[in-house]
Image (spheres, rainbow, N blue to C red):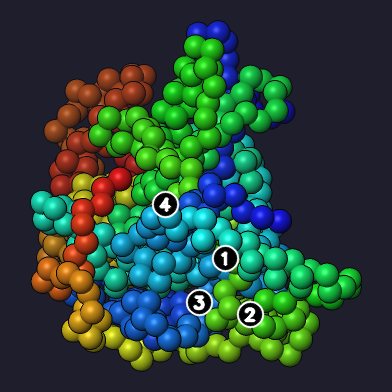
Amino acid sequence: MSAATYTIEGRTGPWELVIGLEVHAQVISKAKLFSGAATAFGAEPNTQVSFVDAGFPGMLPVINRECVAQAVRTGLGLNAEINLWSRFDRKNYFYADLPQGYQISQYAHPIVGRGAVEIELADGTTRRIGITRLHLEQDAGKSLHDQHPTKTFVDLNRAGIALMEIVSEPDMRSPEEAGAFLAKLRQIMRYLGTCDGNMEEGSLRADVNVSVRRPGEGYRTRCEVKNINSIRFVMQAIEAEARRQIAVWEEGGEVEQETRLFDTARGLTRSMRSKEEAHDYRYFPDPDLPPLVLDPAWVEELRRTLPELPDQRKARYMREFGLPAYDASVLVAEKETAAYFEEVARGRDPKLAANWVMGDLFAALNRTKRTIADPPVSARDLGALLDLITDGTLSGKLAKEVFEAMVETGRPPAAIVEERGLRQVTDAGAIEAAVEKVLAAHADKVAEYKAGKEKLFGFFVGQVMKAMAGKGNPALVNAALKRKLG
Amino acid sequence: MSLDTATVRRVAALARIRLEEAEVARLQAELNGILGWIEQLRSVDTEGVEPMAGGAPRGGPTRMPMREDVVTEGNIRELILANAPDREGDFFAVPKVVE
């Protein structure tokens, strides 16, 4: 049974959404796609620019093998066909941050063809989203519009860095699905090490194609909302654009195909200056570049050396560790979280490890505003804490106390246990003495208990623990009390 | 096939070339001459011949050479900026363009 289709209720009835994404992902490589200039983020302006990137006459582009490999790896990660023969075309347009006057891209013959990824929704259902294609192209430079009253400043450091454009089928039907799809692409590329997925720095940006229709209808005209740089904004932009289109249709108007921008402050989309000719890119095969021909053995080698992907890892956590699907999903969502969890779980009870990572550690990350890549407690120290629970040194309650001290001080658990004397008391004699003392001090309650008021047992446990400063081994305290109260 | 004057103006606009009204007719004639020549090429029988890209037929021996992923260039800002019509500090400067 599939979940109900998401609809937006208009004045005249419900409307369905049809959504497709075009995602631009910056490739992780040391040098640019067609030149030997560096790609590192944050360098001094115009220092990572070669004559090729600056569009000087007479320069010839030569492709970077690693960028090609990264595109192939990503294609394999998207379960897509790898085209052993592909070609580069020129996409012609004028803009100040595009010094060549054209972008080298792949139009008619992309390096990667059809594929698919599976997304998981909040209600636990999954959906398959088709990938139409992935192609390689050059990034443009960066324009700064706010530095001068009448001039735009241009930095070409980004010009020529390799981008992968990933195009989906119009398979998504709700903002949530589009958000989940983008998150999934980001996750896959981060696992593969082909894109860092850093949306604030612009390493990953999305264009969203949205149209609306009456249930059961074919496609209506779509609009493209360009250059959105967060998953949350993608979801907001889709809803805002769908509502705008619904209003147009319901007022008897006609949605025009156009490119729009999402105004994040107002939560609305607005039209870009859309001169018809601005979109006439006059693609033609780049005469500087022979075809890109891949050796099948090389592609096989890339396939063989692919790292474990999130779906495979999730399945392994469920199979090998017996974790529930939800826990496994949470732990594999970020590869840093998965690496942390695996280090804690190695040689230990994986369920206990999962509970601590998803419970106390996540809470500590939230509280301290730190990330799993820079945690207040290292995986090694959390593992050591689990060992202290398993060997009986710490009760669960004491362990939480020790963990908080670890978060505060960054010290390993054994040191904290020693310093603060938090070691759990398992010495039978000491527990027995504490029990006897408590029973002697509450002779009246003991009499009541023996007369049948059994719920007083909890009171005795509390008193003994209190007398032992919380350090008594709970199981041993219980056993001793039962024996004495007989 | 022949181009009308509107198409000539459009091609010029796409290439950011300003056309004086008097030039349109002359360019129309020149472009139509070029198109006529290409039309002539189309009379060659290419049935069963693979289209070429970058001077290399599909399935042929010519393929794109590749470079290794090594940083070999950069730090030539002054050379890069030397021909810029305008610069501000370490940036190219252009008339303000805002979407």
Q: From the image, state whether disc 3 or disc 1 is nearer to you.
A: 1
- Circle 3 residue: A67
Chain under label 1? B
Q: Callout 3: 10 Å neighbours few (<14), some, many (20+)?
A: many
Give above or below for A207 relative to A247: below
Where the N terminus of chain B falls, by quadrant?
A: bottom right
- The amino acid type, in three-letter code, at marker 1 is Glu
Which of the two residues, B82 or A115, is positioned nearer the viewer here? B82
Q: From the image, state whether disc 2 or disc 3 is nearer to you.
A: 2
Q: Position of residue B50 (x, y in %)?
A: 80, 75
Q: From the image, state whether disc 4 or disc 2 is nearer to you.
A: 4
Disc 1 from disc 2: Cα separation: 26 Å
Disc 3 from disc 1: Cα separation: 42 Å
Secondary element at tag 4: helix
Chain under label 4? B
| Residue B54 disc label | 2
The quadrant holding residue A454 is top left
Q: Position of residue A378 (x, y in %)?
A: 29, 66
Chain under label 3? A
- Circle 1 residue: B30
Q: Are marks 1 and 2 on the same chain?
A: yes
- Circle 4 residue: B21
* Callouts 4 and 2 close, C-beta under 8 Å: no
Give above or below for A456 relative to B38: above
Disc 1 from disc 4: Cα separation: 15 Å
Q: Callout 4: 10 Å neighbours few (<14), some, many (20+)?
A: few
Q: From the image, state whether disc 1 or disc 2 is nearer to you.
A: 1
Secondary element at tag 3: helix
| Residue A454 disc label | none
